[in-house]
Image (spheres, rainbow, N blue to C red):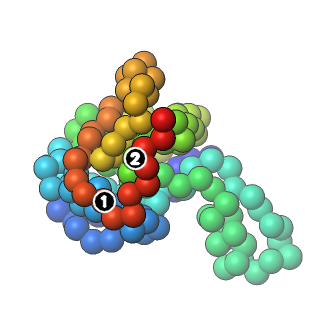
């Protein structure tokens, strides 16, 4: 099933993206200050993959909502002259962020909205030690945004 992009936002938009967590938002905004000019538009909370359909016995509004919410959702997708960039924003990123990016990219590639290329990008303040080689081997970019983050969890060993 094609990604459901939703509303398009201009590259200068600095509002609160739909469903972006309070922990992710400071990272996103910090990264955006130096990277927004690379993009021509943003999409947030992009629905990917097949939905769960609760059936026709549910009213159409609730049925649509259930189907939309059951799909996986990428934090952000940027559009640039080079193509699409699927962005995962995750403080203190580990293997789960890698898994999310790889899953989202596979779902996108299974039924893309058009023929432009797609790339994956992780925005984080800290990458779990030893994972940088895995991200690189998967062809994913990692942008580190050093900053103080509230509610810091200890770095796993």
Calculate the distance from the C-alpha at mark 2 to the C-alpha at mark 1: 10 Å
| Mark 2 crowd level (few <14, some 14–19, many ≥20, 10 Å Cα) | some
Residue 139 appears in view: no
Query: Residue 156 placed where, x, y %?
Result: 48, 41
Q: What element carries label 2?
A: loop
Label drawn at residue 16: none
| Mark 1 crowd level (few <14, some 14–19, many ≥20, 10 Å Cα) | some
Of the numbered discs 2 and 1, the one sitting upstream in the chain is: 2
Residue at x 43% of width, y 28% of height? 131
- Between 104 and 90, the one nearer to me in the picture: 90
Query: Residue 77 placed where, x, y %?
Result: 37, 50
- Between 108 and 114, the one nearer to me in the picture: 108
Residue at x 43% of width, y 65% of height? 21
Residue at mark 1: 149
Residue at mark 2: 92
Residue at x 43% of width, y 49% of height? 154
Residue 61 position by quadrant: bottom right
- Between 137 and 4, the one nearer to me in the picture: 137
Relative placement, left or right, of 100 versus 68 is left
Q: What element carries label 1?
A: loop
| In the rendered image, the vertical position of residue 16 relative to residue 114, given as above or below | below
């Amino acid at each position: 099933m094609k990604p459901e992009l939703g509303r398009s936002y201009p590259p200068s938009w600095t509002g609160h993206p739909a469903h972006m967590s309070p922990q992710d938002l400071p990272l996103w905004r910090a990264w955006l200050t130096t990277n927004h000019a690379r993009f021509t538009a943003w999409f947030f909370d992009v629905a990917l993959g097949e939905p769960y359909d609760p059936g026709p016995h549910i009213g159409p509004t609730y049925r649509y909502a259930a189907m939309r919410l059951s799909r996986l959702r990428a934090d952000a997708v940027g559009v640039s002259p080079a193509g699409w960039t699927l962005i995962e924003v995750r403080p203190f990123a580990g293997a789960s962020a890698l898994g999310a990016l790889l899953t989202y990219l596979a779902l996108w590639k299974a039924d893309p909205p058009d023929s432009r290329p797609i790339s994956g990008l992780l925005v984080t303040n800290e990458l779990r030690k030893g994972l940088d080689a895995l991200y690189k081997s998967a062809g994913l970019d990692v942008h580190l945004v050093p900053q103080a983050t509230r509610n810091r969890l200890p770095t796993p060993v």
